[in-house]
């Protein structure tokens, strides 16, 4: 039987199939089921600073209601302070105590100081690593790309200076030079990069004239973007690369590893097929390796990356585009 074990950011995993940060990990029971189904590791749903701020605002509003109705009302409510991240941190500690598989804490903050503050608090829960979920929409037209990128890099460097745990950064694919940004993330001290954060785009209902915010699951076709960049960057960087978005079946796991991914992260396929689908992903990978005669993941990781490509590297970068043009020409002639 093939050996599926690997390491991610120095963390030993029994296989390269991880559960991505998502709502499934909101319950400890789900995480236990994921472990039993064979997950190599799990990224706990993100701690969002904006959610904490919203809850603090709700609490302040509730405590102030009626406070000016009469004199005694000013001291009617007891002194209550919002627990900030305490509830989330307590829940992470419970999860750590209930499971043995590697757990990665996830964080999405706003201000630089908050990234450091909450990263240190998450590190104290017993997680094996941290994932900085850098989810931001650069809507300020006065702010250029250099400034936007530098802010992210400063955050990574500041967290690295304060936390000893391995750190991965989850980014979007919307950079002018994705490879350059990832190299700078590595220089800032990150141990891994997650490709890519999936932005939920707004939809418009023309009949009701309203903006819709719908949760849509990813599809295997969306995997092509991380597949491309992982294949291009494999062998050029030291940090580990996690393929995220569009990994639905065991064949997709194989594709990501052939491109050079260290691990894969799945979420949408678990919402569609259930947490038990993890077993199919792991067993499918094992069966493919046995059929191909691969004894370990390292035997084929990166085999279809640009580094492993036998031929002109430029052709690897442009192959799909050129193939598309040629196929269109053949179609027109027909």
Image (spheres, rainbow, N blue to C red):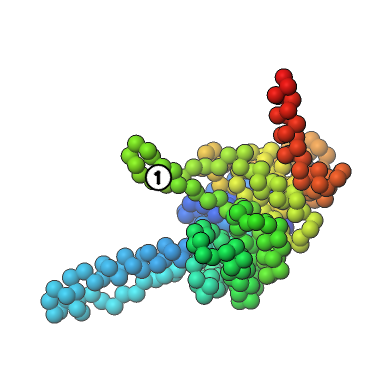
Q: Is residue 237 left or right of residue 82?
A: right
Residue 231 in percent (x, y) is at: 75, 49
* Whole-percent x, y for residue 236 in the image: 79, 58
Q: Residue at x 49, y 67 (%)?
A: 110
Residue 190 against residue 271 in the figure, above or below: below
- Front residue of 111/3: it is 111
| Residue for badge 1 | 212
Frontmost residue, 328 versus 8? 328
Quarter occupied by the C terminus: top right
Q: Position of residue 106 (x, y in %)?
A: 55, 61
The tally of labels here is 1
Give the vertical position of 99 relative to 57 (above or below).
above
In this rendering, would 115 be left or right of 51?
Answer: right
Which residue occupies 83% across, 39% down? 293
Q: Quadrant of residue 52?
A: bottom left
Q: Which residue is the extreme one toward the right?
A: 311
- Relative to 8, say whether 188 is above or below: below
């Amino acid at each position: 039987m093939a050996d599926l074990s690997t390491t991610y950011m120095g963390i030993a995993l029994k296989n390269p199939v991880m559960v991505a940060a998502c709502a499934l990990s909101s319950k400890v029971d789900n995480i236990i089921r994921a472990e039993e189904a064979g997950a190599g590791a799990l990224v706990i749903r993100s701690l969002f600073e904006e959610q904490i701020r919203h809850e603090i605002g709700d609490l302040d509003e509730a405590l102030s209601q009626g406070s000016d109705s009469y004199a005694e009302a000013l001291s009617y409510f007891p002194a209550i302070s919002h627990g900030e991240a305490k509830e989330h941190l307590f829940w992470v500690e419970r999860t750590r105590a209930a499971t043995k598989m590697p757990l990665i804490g996830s964080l999405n903050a706003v201000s630089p100081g908050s990234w450091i503050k909450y990263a240190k608090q998450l590190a104290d829960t017993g997680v094996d690593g941290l994932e900085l979920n850098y989810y931001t929409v650069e809507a300020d037209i006065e702010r250029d790309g250099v400034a936007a990128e530098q802010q992210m890099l400063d955050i990574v460097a500041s967290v690295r200076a304060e936390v000893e745990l391995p750190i991965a950064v989850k980014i979007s694919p919307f950079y002018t030079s994705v490879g350059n940004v990832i190299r700078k993330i590595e220089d800032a001290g990150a141990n891994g990069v997650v490709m890519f954060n999936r932005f939920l785009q707004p939809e418009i209902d023309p009949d009701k004239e309203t903006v819709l915010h719908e949760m849509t699951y990813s599809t295997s076709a969306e995997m092509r973007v991380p597949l491309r960049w992982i294949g291009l960057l494999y062998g050029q960087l030291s940090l580990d690369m996690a393929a995220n978005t569009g990994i639905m079946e065991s064949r997709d796991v194989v594709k990501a590893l052939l491109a050079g991914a260290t691990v894969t992260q799945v979420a949408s396929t678990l919402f569609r097929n259930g947490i038990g689908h993890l077993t199919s992903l792991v067993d499918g990978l094992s069966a493919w390796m046995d059929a191909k005669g691969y004894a370990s993941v390292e035997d084929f990781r990166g085999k279809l990356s640009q580094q492993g490509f036998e031929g002109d590297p430029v052709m690897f970068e442009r192959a799909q585009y050129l193939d598309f043009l040629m196929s269109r020409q053949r179609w027109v002639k027909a």
